[in-house]
Image: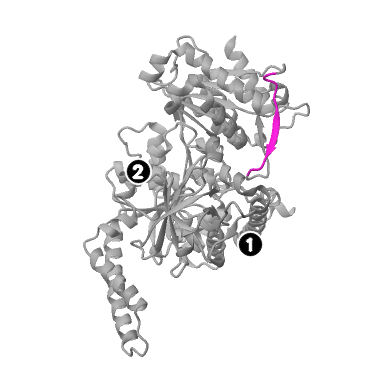
């Protein structure tokens, strides 16, 4: 018998995950430092990994009793071209402060390396950073101060800890561990007739029923536009008719915000652990920090914390009663904090956080009947085990035919680190998977290619969107071949990126905007503005995204439409949709080299963002050597006949 046919040991499989994660950790840490050393401050700013210079606002203690510093990004003239570059600062990411003045060749660390912290939240050009007590924040008043992302040790530490706990587990966690890694074990389920749910279609109804029947695990597989979020919200709502509280997690803050907002709209009491990526009153109103500050006992707690800080600051030598006073104040503050927390968590029906955020000290010791993991196909397996140890059963929702997890170590990727827990269970336990099959986003002819290639032709269009279009008799998909002649001939340039290089193609970037302008002229300015027809320009390469943004800003024609046009990478458009999508594929060479365009899951995301019109720009002579792009080109050509 061959080794691959032997049963997999759950412990051995988790040890293998641990080894692959260690490889990824070492590679990412090494690459991060090399990039910092090699590409320079200006490039860090352009990449969205640094703000410089910054001005410093007030410092204060937040409701979690953390010392916080407010900083503002000051735009300078050398950075005008990139003033719309997306930054990568978000809640929970580690940062460090530095100084760079005109007389300094290289940035220098501030405070002897003690000025490090964690992003509390970001809103436009304002960021709040929590720093350790005693950090020399006076140093931030110097000239030329900036802030940059530092390597994220915390996430890795939590993932390694989750794998360790899972391997050593007893009880329910051990049962789920063995179930997920042992194909011979059967997932348990309840048995009852299907229930009907208003506003859901047949497959969505079936998915909710399967979630309710599951004792151990269920998967909602949602292709683009099929209403995965709507289905998941209904499943959570129905679960809460049977359970007092659930835990809802996702890989990113943005995904947690999205599902949390929908649950709040459904009338559920959501407690969001961690700050949202979009800072507005609605989003902030259900965060733990805002609810904590709004509690009637909070002013008393704040006064006690202030008294503790004052007592420590003004301690007199020889004060024999210092420790006694301090302990008494700390005991009263702790009792108040525990009381506020108990009330907030007892009132919440949904506790929501990122996967890593579920390891927060606030959730220590808490158990949940059901854990829902949204966008589970983008999460590393180790990250999923962080919240699973708090739950009796798990519901995964996502689409493993769209964006995969980000894995930077090639050897770890080859070893299987990019294969998610959801994907593993889909492969070994298809009986727990429900595929949503009716999509409500795209014109039928935009949807059809994705359905055929990725979903075995099982996804169908709802009647109300099947023939949606902007112009009468329009062809929903157009592929524009850049001419080989000079002004629009592709020009490549390598620029640093998270994958160590990125491509831009100036000829194709200009042609992209020419194609969009021509389509705008067909629609007409008045209709574009009155109906607010929105547009997404997508490129797999960040360097091309930045180039198109610069060119777009310089063109007078597009000024009235700036609020309707967004330009971003494929990853930046995950979960979004637009009336018109324009894709610049960039690659053009004699060797047929297409780099990470071979990751077809990313292309599935790109081609399924459009509601009514999809325009693709790409050199078919380069791309069509790959069977996916050849089939796509043939499909688009057939639509013209």
Read off the residue under disc 2.
Answer: 261
Label annotation for residue 323: none
> What is the number of callouts on the image?
2
| Residue 416 to residue 153: above or below | above
Of residues 605 and 568, the one nearer the viewer is: 568
Residue at disc 2, secondary structure: helix
User: Where residue 73 appears, x then y in whole percent?
Assistant: 46, 47
Magenta region, residue range: 487-497
Q: Residues within 10 Å of mark 1 (few under 14, many from 20)?
A: some
| 298 lies left or right of 395 | left
Q: Is residue 496 magenta?
A: yes
- Of the numbered discs 2 and 1, the one sitting upstream in the chain is 1
The residue mark sitting in front, 2 or 1, is 2
Please tell me in which quadrant of the rendered image residue 587 appears. Answer: top right
Q: Is residue 281 visible?
A: yes
From what the image shows, is residue 163 above or below residue 267? below
Task: Using the image as rendered, state which of residue 280 and residue 385 is in the foreground.
Answer: 280
Residue 5: x percent and y percent? 69, 52
Q: How is the image coloured?
A: one colour
Q: Quadrant of the C terminus?
A: top right
Predominant secondary structure, magenta span: loop
Q: Position of residue 369 (x, y in %)?
A: 38, 57
Residue placed at 51% from the left, 63% from the top?
A: 115
For the point 34% across and 46% down, the residue is 283
Q: Where is the N terminus found, in terms of image quarters? A: bottom right
Q: Which mark is residue 15?
A: 1
Answer yes or no: do the residues labelled 2 and 1 have beta carbons within 8 Å? Answer: no
Label 2 crowd (10 A; few <14 / some 14-19 / many >=20)? some
Q: Is residue 63 above or below residue 237?
A: below
Residue 637 place in picture, x, y as percent: 62, 15
Queried whether the magenta region covers residue 124, the answer comes back as no
């Amino acid at each position: 018998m061959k080794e691959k046919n032997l049963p997999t040991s759950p412990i051995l499989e988790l040890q293998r995950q641990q080894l692959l994660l260690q490889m990824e950790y070492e590679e990412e840490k090494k690459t991060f430092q090399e990039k910092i050393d090699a590409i320079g401050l200006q490039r860090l700013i352009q990449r969205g990994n640094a703000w410089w210079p910054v001005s410093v606002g007030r410092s204060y203690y937040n409701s979690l009793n953390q010392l916080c510093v407010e900083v503002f990004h000051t735009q300078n003239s050398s950075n005008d071209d990139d003033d719309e570059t997306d930054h990568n600062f978000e809640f929970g990411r580690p940062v460090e402060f530095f100084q760079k003045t005109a007389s300094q060749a290289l940035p220098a660390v501030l405070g002897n390396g003690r000025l490090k912290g964690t992003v509390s939240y970001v809103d436009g050009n304002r960021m709040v950073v929590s720093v350790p007590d005693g950090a020399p924040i006076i140093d931030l008043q110097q000239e030329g101060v900036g802030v940059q992302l530092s390597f994220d040790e915390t996430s890795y530490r939590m993932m390694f800890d989750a794998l360790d706990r899972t391997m050593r587990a007893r009880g329910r966690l051990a049962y789920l561990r063995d179930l997920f890694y042992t194909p011979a074990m059967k997932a348990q389920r309840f048995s009852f007739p299907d229930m009907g749910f208003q506003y859901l279609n047949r497959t969505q109804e079936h998915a909710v029923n399967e979630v309710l029947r599951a004792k151990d695990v269920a998967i909602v597989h949602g292709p683009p536009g099929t209403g995965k979020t709507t289905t998941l919200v209904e499943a959570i709502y129905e679960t809460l008719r049977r359970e007092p509280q659930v835990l809802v997690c996702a890989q990113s803050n943005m995904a947690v915000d999205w599902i949390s907002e929908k649950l709040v709209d459904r009338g559920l009491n959501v407690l969001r652990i961690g700050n949202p990526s979009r800072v507005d009153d609605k989003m902030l109103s259900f965060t733990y920090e805002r609810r904590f500050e709004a509690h009637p006992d909070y002013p008393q707690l704040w006064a006690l914390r202030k008294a503790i800080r004052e007592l420590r600051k003004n301690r007199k030598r020889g004060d024999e009663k210092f420790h006694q006073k301090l302990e008494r104040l700390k005991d009263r503050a702790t009792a108040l904090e525990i009381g506020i927390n108990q009330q907030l968590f007892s009132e919440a029906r949904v506790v929501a956080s990122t996967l890593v955020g579920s390891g927060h000290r606030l959730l220590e010791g808490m158990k949940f009947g059901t854990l829902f993991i949204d966008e589970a196909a983008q999460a590393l397996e180790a990250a999923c085990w962080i919240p699973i140890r708090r739950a009796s059963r798990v519901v995964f929702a996502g689409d493993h035919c769209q964006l995969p997890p980000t894995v930077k170590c090639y050897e770890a990727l080859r070893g299987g680190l990019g294969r998610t827990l959801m994907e593993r269970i889909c492969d070994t336990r298809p009986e727990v998977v429900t595929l949503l099959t009716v999509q409500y986003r795209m014109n039928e002819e935009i949807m059809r290619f994705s359905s055929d290639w990725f979903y075995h032709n099982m996804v169908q269009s709802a009647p109300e969107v099947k023939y949606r279009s902007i112009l009468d008799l329009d062809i929903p998909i157009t592929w524009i071949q850049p001419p080989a002649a000079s002004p629009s001939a592709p020009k490549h340039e390598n620029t640093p990126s998270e994958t160590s290089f990125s491509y831009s193609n100036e000829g194709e970037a200009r042609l992209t905007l020419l194609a969009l302008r021509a389509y705008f002229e067909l629609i007409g300015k008045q209709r574009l503005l009155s109906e607010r027809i929105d547009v997404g320009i997508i490129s797999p390469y960040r360097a091309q995204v930045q180039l198109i943004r610069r060119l777009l800003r310089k063109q007078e024609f597009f000024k009235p439409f700036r609020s309707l046009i967004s330009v971003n990478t494929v990853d930046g458009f995950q979960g979004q949709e637009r009336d018109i999508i324009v894709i610049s594929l960039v690659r053009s060479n004699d060797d047929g080299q297409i780099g990470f365009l071979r990751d077809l899951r990313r292309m599935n995301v790109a081609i399924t963002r459009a509601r009514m019109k999809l325009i693709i720009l790409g050199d078919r002579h380069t791309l069509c050597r790959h069977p996916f792009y050849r089939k796509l080109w043939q499909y688009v050509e057939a639509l013209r006949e």
